[in-house]
Image (cartoon, rainbow, N blue to C red):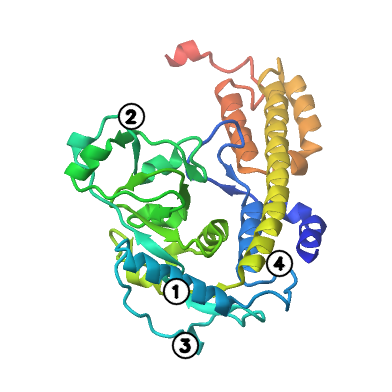
Amino acid sequence: MAVEKLIVDHIDTWTTALQTRSTAGRGSSGKIDLYGIKKLRELILELAVRGKLVPQDPNDEPASVLLERIAAEKAELMKQGKIKKQKPLPEISEEEKPFELPVGWEWTRLINLGTWALGSGFPNVVQGNSDKEILMCKVSDMNLEGNEKFIVSTINTISKDLADEYKIKTSEPGTIIFPKIGGAIATNKRRILVQETAIDNNCLGIKPCNAISGEWFYLILSALDMSKYQSGTSIPAINQSVIGSIPIALPSLKMQEKILSYVITLMSLCDQLELHSLTSLDAHQQLVETLLTTLTDSQNADELAENWSRISEHFDTLFTTEASIDALKQTILQLAVMGKLVPQDPNDEPASELL
């Protein structure tokens, strides 16, 4: 396929574009963000939501039929009292449509594809338990190990009785949640609930309709940059009505599954590129540090000059990352403190006289 060729033909571009992270991680590559691969993942998602990844099948059921099933599903939920009647949203204008749809696809607004899952306040009195049946998810819980995609654990849990007593709302498995307040919006985290979970007021969620693929809906939300829709300056926030009104290109259920399958294949390729790049970065940094140690271990000026000559021959290869340049700076400072940068003159006044 064309995208696979794009990845392979430009592998050096994807794997060598680096960016420093704001927070440290493990190992010398922990502070490095593989910017090229990150942008490649974004490109894959962008192509996926536009219907550019896989060929369209004219025999597929049109998305208009899927929209009818979604409407019927929501009508039944309203009849059962599980959701409130949704205020009709305006038709999507031509100005709102960011691209031309593939044949058989339909434009719809985001919230037409699901129902809102709202957060609750978590009083201190209900926090502190880790062995109850309902998870209590805060934005910080999205960062826990194992919660990279699915929320499988949280710091706090709550019993059903206590949740009812304090009127804490819970959300169903399959609900996709994300931060809605503060700087966390820009992290664009998306997480899927796997069991009944209460989310706090800093989170917002959408439960996709059963008529569509939950994984495809997760892909759609992952492709959205929520920070583009935030308001406020001191404390940014996203508004439900704004997010719910975002135009979404809807393919048939069969096409959703095809797109997902191909995205998984391409993301797996990105994972392999990322692993290879991080391993190479760690090995590169270890080599740099080993060679720089020969400078500080030099016994005299001649040995230092010889060791530096050996390193300088490969300067453009060795000092290509921020970490390697920082290591070089620190080595120079250490050599200065050790008095190894310039030859020592035995005729100089001894430091004892200066004291």
Q: Which residue is mark 3?
A: 93
Query: Relative to 304, is 236 above or below?
Result: below
- What is the quadrant of residue 283 in the picture? top right
- SS label for mark 3: loop
Question: Could you tell me the amino acid type at mark 1?
Answer: Ala
> Along the polypeptide, which appears first: circle 4 or circle 1?
4
> Along the polypeptide, which appears first: circle 3 or circle 2?
3
Where is the C terminus found, in terms of image quarters? top left
Is residue 346 something that shows in the picture? Answer: yes
> Along the polypeptide, which appears first: circle 3 or circle 1?
1
Q: Nearer the viewer, residue 291 or 4?
A: 4
- What is the quadrant of residue 83 in the picture? bottom left
The answer to whether the residues at label 2 and label 4 have Cβ atoms under 8 Å apart is: no
Q: Which residue is mark 1?
A: 71
Question: Could you tell me the amino acid type at mark 4?
Answer: Leu
How far is the residue under mark 3 from the one under mark 1? 21 Å
Q: Residue 211 placed where, x, y %?
A: 52, 65
The answer to whether the residues at label 3 and label 1 have Cβ atoms under 8 Å apart is: no
Report the residue at 69% width, 40% height from top: 275
| Residue 53, numbered label | 4
The answer to whether the residues at label 3 and label 4 have Cβ atoms under 8 Å apart is: no
The answer to whether the residues at label 3 and label 2 have Cβ atoms under 8 Å apart is: no
Is residue 296 left or right of 79 when viewed as pictured? Answer: right
Q: Nearer the observer, disc 3 or disc 2?
A: 2
Question: Could you tell me the amino acid type at mark 3?
Answer: Ser
How far is the residue under mark 4 from the one under mark 1? 28 Å
Q: Which residue is mark 2?
A: 130
Is residue 239 something that shows in the picture? Answer: no
Is residue 272 left or right of 252 when viewed as pictured? Answer: right
Where is the N terminus found, in terms of image quarters? bottom right
How far is the residue under mark 3 from the one under mark 4? 26 Å
> Along the polypeptide, which appears first: circle 3 or circle 4?
4
